Image: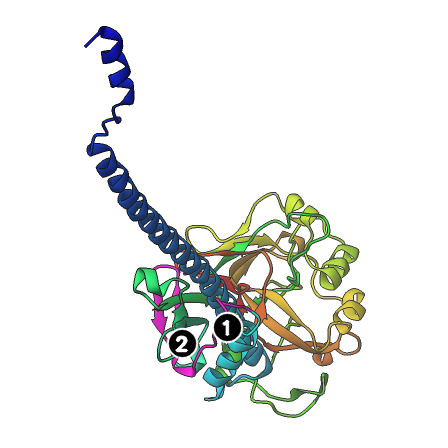
Amino acid sequence: MTNEDKARGSLDSPVKRFPGKHLHRGAAAVLGVFLMVTLATLMAITIDLGYIHVAETELRRSADAAAMAGCWEIFAQRAESAELGNNLPLLVADAANHVAANNHVGEITPLVTQADVELGKYDPVTGWSLANVSEAQAVRITLRRDNGTNTELPLFYAALTGRESQELKTTAIAAMFSSVAGFFEPPTVHETRGILPLALDLDSWEAAVAGSTVDDYMMENGEVVAGSDGIFETNLYPKGTGAPGNRGTVDIGDSNNSTNDLARQILHGISRQDFVDLGKPLVFDEHGELHLNGDTGISAGIKDELASLIGKTRIVPIFTEVSGQGNNSVFTIVKFEGVRILDVKLTGKKSQKRVIVQPATVVGRGIKVDWSGQNHSSHLLTPVMLVE
């Protein structure tokens, strides 16, 4: 056979294929299917986990809003009456659900049951504790999606992940604080603090709170009328208590406060400039005291301003002692409290002059919380805030 024949024969012979190539292609196909299934499963898990995270955030937001609404309901009920009825938990639950109904978690709007609404107190030192209706100042809300309440959160890829739904649960606490260390300076010139520049002695305040004074006034349809409402009154006008000629007006601002300054503060509150002019923080010291200079006393020059506040609430400083006389007097303030002004008469005989107030629950703006728990007010609260 010639070399030409050999060459031709090699061209005519079939091409040899190696069986390993078929095996490699089959393995790659199997691996590709496995990776696709794995990737699809990971994507399903990621999507479901993301959905769960979003739902948890929504549930937390709804619980926070519900707890704050419930706590504001406590204040509203307390402001309306001296006694909080046994139906308060139901009213708080209704207020919480009114807000919770506006928040979606997944495809539903979960609501709280009355069993998931707890009334209590939140102490700056010890934290949350349950409390009876009369002492409640905080609300703990538990919001859930489970088989017992609101149904579990359905997931998208149960066929791939083996999980059809997810149970969710969160708790939120909102509280008002009665531990008042004083007041922050208003951040702007347009904001004030609703404090009267009139101080009341501690004994008179405690007598009214204890119900050992008189009960001659009441609120009816938004107006002050004669009658008994179970909330006792006291008189801010000086009648032999405190420094001679000065029982109650104090300088929260410049030491040379005029009648015009007092009138402005009565009508509009303590301004930012007043805080600057005071020259020191309006807060209690380490002994739980705040020393304020006295002014010239309660006079007829501010009767119209005080009369315009009849039926309204304000904050008054409470003092334990006063030294000096007139403009040189110094009041030792030990707490701030909320009052409602009921009657004003600053003309005529001194024995007939009066500025009648009764204890009233007030929410104060710009309150500095006393986190040590040393200074407590019975009728002055901070605005509702989330604490947990």
Q: Which residue is mark 1?
A: 108
Which quarter of the rendering shows the C terminus?
bottom left
Residue 318 location (% of width, % of height): 54, 65
Kind of residue at badge 2: Thr
Mark 1 neighbour class, 10 Å CA radius: few under 14, some 14 to 19, many 20 or more: few
Farthest top residue?
Answer: 3
Q: Is residue 139 left or right of residue 164?
A: right
Residue 151 numbered tag: 2
Q: Is residue 211 left or right of residue 144?
A: right
**Image quarter of residue 95:** bottom right
Residue 20 location (% of width, % of height): 20, 33
Which quarter of the rendering shows the N terminus?
top left
Kind of residue at badge 1: Ile
Note whether residue 37 is visible: yes
Residue 311 location (% of width, % of height): 70, 78
Farthest bottom residue?
Answer: 227
Residue 366 location (% of width, % of height): 58, 56
Q: Residue at x 63, y 46 (%)?
A: 278
Q: Is residue 12 above or below residue 80?
A: above
